[in-house]
Image: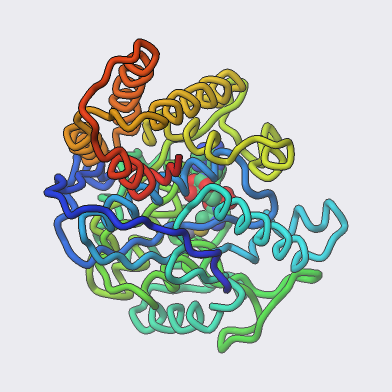
Amino acid sequence: MKSWAPVYLPPTTQREFPILAIHNSLTGKKDAISENPVTMYVCGITPYDATHLGHAATYLTFDLINRYLRLTGRAIEYVQNITDVDDPLLERAQRDNVEWESLAANQISLFRDDMTALRVLPPDHYMGAVETIPWVIDAVNELKKQNSVYEIEGDLYFDISSDPEFNTYNLLSYEEQIAIFAERGGDPQRPGKRNPLDCLIWRSEREGEPAWPSPFGAGRPGWHIECTAIALKYLTAPISIQGGGSDLHFPHHTMCAAEGKVLSSKDFARRFVHAGMIGLDGEKMSKSKGNLKFVSVMRAAGIDPLVIRIALLSGHYREDRPWSDALLVQSQARLELWRQAFSSPYGGDVETLIMAMAERLSDDLDTPGSFELLDVWASERVRALASEERAEVSDVGQLSRFLDAALGIAL
Ligand code: 5CA
Ligand code: ZN
């Protein structure tokens, strides 16, 4: 699948930036990313309703990781999928009386435009479920060889007991997992399952649904195996980071970890990195609740995507946090303050500011902390400018290039 347009990364001076330490939700601890190259698989959209501000916040989180690692000289290989065939997409297409293929194509196109407008660096490999069905078939065949698959009425299930470490990927109790599994696309109650948590990896053809031929009969891939197969096609286990929103920790990333473990005989991911949920009016922003704010609609209303970017990054990525119009107004004011500060060559000690901001970012992407440092610097510059004080003339261009490279904020 075509990815989106490359984003210009300005050249920056080589500095001794601290190593990025990121919260790993597999261990509950902060974890320094010291390996090189770094491999990252981030779960992409299911294209029936894109891009709302929750999606945007999650992809901005991984964009920051990508940018910080590049700034510190790391090679990074970044893979993202698109779940372009799955139950929610088919249901929405049926509800709206449109072809599922055209619904997906339109939403993917909107998503690309939104990512470009938000200055998100594109992944190296951007792959859809439909175009990677042969990889899923290979993965299912391999799981069969490992005796990890069983059948119920033509549907194939992954047997979670084939990964002895299944219980180590999250902190939920068995009962909690069953409850969440039912809410997030699982079928714990289906008769004939060995374990209620076993997940579907091949869904046999149903009337009126798309299907593709396979050695196990016509059908389509289950959700989790899609990401496992795509990730392992490009990246070697253990991948450095598997990422997404916190709602993917279970079941999705847990199932990917288990399937990936059986397929590769290694840990699937070294780290799970999960972004918090963006809410609106006290509830998680989600398609099912219908309380969505779309980046494309905001852009069409003339809102600067840079202001959206600043607003979403002004909270910490792991916090569940609400969106509000007030946040947008504050972010617009912040952007104006920063721009005003850059209108003077008397920047003062920008090197110290750059290192202090980088130090905040390296500590689990503390964007609120780094923005506050920039606010203090900018307020002081604006005050000095108004009182015609002359601070030290400095290369404010260095700071401008750092903000662009590290935070995607081109002033
Ligand atoms: N296609 C699957 C992943 S393989 C999927 O979850 N698609 S999605 O369109 O539902 O979500 C895309 C990404 O946005 C996921 O990482 C999800 O965790 C994240 N996301 C969804 N809603 C929110 C929200 N309200 N706040 C933050 N992130 C969200
Ligand atoms: Zn995924």
Residue for point 41% across, 68% down: 228
Residue for point 28% across, 60% down: 269
**Camera sees residue 303:** yes
Residue 240 higher or lower than 405, as above or below: below
Residue for point 63% across, 65% down: 84
Q: Residue furthest bottom?
A: 215
Q: Position of residue 405 (x, y in %)?
A: 35, 50
Residue for point 50% across, 69% down: 126
Q: Position of residue 337 (x, y in %)?
A: 45, 23
Q: Quadrant of the C terminus?
A: top left
Residue 337 higher or lower than 103, as above or below: above
Q: Quadrant of residue 270?
A: bottom left
Q: Quadrant of residue 402?
A: top left
Q: Nearer the viewer, residue 14 or 159?
A: 14
Q: Residue furthest top?
A: 387
Q: Residue furthest right?
A: 97
Q: Position of residue 13 (x, y in %)?
A: 21, 53
**Camera sees residue 188:** no
Residue 185 higher or lower than 326, as above or below: below
Q: Nearer the viewer, residue 27 or 40?
A: 40
